[in-house]
Amino acid sequence: MFAATLLALVLGLAARPAAAGEEATVSIDNFTFSPAEVTVAPGTTVTWVNNDDIPHTVVDKKQAFRSKVLDTEGKYSFTFNTAGDFTYFCSLHPHMTGKVVVKPAG
């Protein structure tokens, strides 16, 4: 019984969006953003990490944020304080796209 309750609790927490003040990470690897879509609460900082062998950028289509060119192991962080959908791309490789969905927990 305890194990089943613990498992349900763990699975429930894993499915939750990151809470405000928490952090989320997006990996850049093999010309993709992974995960391609991340859901977070307002106040969450998202960090992109370039694990590719070539440079990439992170640019919001509505210009809310824009990274400098990220070399291998380069990082860029942005704190999302406003609810909404933020679709972004790599300006060096525009076919690379991702999305951050910011919505209050509840």
Image (spheres, rainbow, N blue to C red):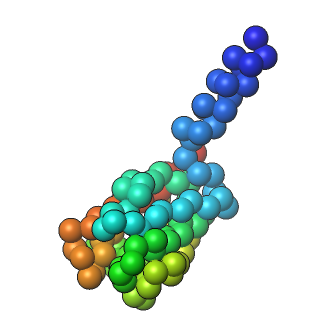
Q: Position of residue 88 (x, y in %)?
A: 33, 69
Q: Position of residue 90 (x, y in %)?
A: 30, 75
> In the image, what residue occupies the spot 24% across and 76% down?
93
Q: Quadrant of the C terminus?
A: top right
Q: Quadrant of the N terminus?
A: top right
Can you say whether 105 is above or below 67 in the image? above
In the image: residue 94, left or right of residue 65: left
Q: Residue furthest top?
A: 1
> In the image, what residue occupies the spot 50% across and 81% down?
74
Q: Position of residue 64 (x, y in %)?
A: 40, 76
Q: Residue furthest front?
A: 53
In the image: residue 61, left or right of residue 40: left
Can you say whether 6 is above or below 65 in the image? above
Q: Residue furthest bottom?
A: 68
Q: Please say whether residue 63 is visible from this viewpoint.
A: yes
Q: Please say whether residue 62 is visible from this viewpoint.
A: no
In the image: residue 23, left or right of residue 101: right
Question: How many marks on residues?
Answer: 0
Can you say whether 39 is above or below 55 in the image? above
